[in-house]
Amino acid sequence: MAGEPQADCLFCKIVAGDVPATLVHETETTVAFRDINPQAPTHVLVIPRAHYADAAALAGADPAVAADIVRAAGLVAEQEGATDSGYRIVFNTGAGAGQTVFHAHAHVLAGRGLNWPPG
């Protein structure tokens, strides 16, 4: 069920403290931690504490928490010193878009050129 922790979800396990992560920011509704496979010098994931499969499911079920994720991503970018040089907030939604953990999450990327399209 949406919002409920999922026993097989890596990010739910991080929220519960059952899987270690390098936390960089927490709020009542969000957790931010460093990506274990960074794609930029700064690569932090911001997730809702509640489980939603992807950004679209989260936005449909709880738009206030979706906004909290974007707000937390901005605070993480500021904390990481990325606001002057710029940063990217990315939500991958679905396997075809590169989503590999099916718990909504935003990537905060900074510290190198981030021209679009990527690659």
Image (tube, rainbow, N blue to C red):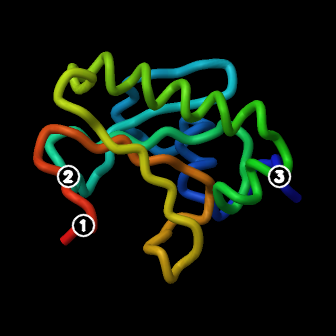
Vertical comparison of 70 with 28: above or below: below
Location of mark 2 (residue): 114
Residue located at (14% from left, 38% from top)? 111
Mark 1 → mark 2, Cα distance in angstroms: 7 Å
Crowding near the residue tagged with mark 3, few <14, some 14–19, many ≥20 C-alpha atoms within 10 Å: few
Residue located at (48% from left, 75% from top)? 97
Position of residue 74 in the picture relative to residue 93 (left or right): left
Location of mark 3 (residue): 60
Q: Quarter-wise, where is residue 24 in the image?
A: top left
Name the image quarter holding the C terminus: bottom left
Q: Position of residue 38 (x, y in %)?
A: 23, 52
Residue located at (56% from left, 41% from top)? 47
Vertical comparison of 63 with 40: above or below: above
Q: Position of residue 112 (x, y in %)?
A: 11, 45
Of helix, strand and loop, which one carries label 1? loop
**As drawn, which residue projects farthest toward the front?**
116
| Nearest the eye: 29 or 23 | 29
For residue 118, which numbered disc appears in the image? 1
Residue located at (55% from left, 33% from top)? 70
Of helix, strand and loop, which one carries label 3? helix
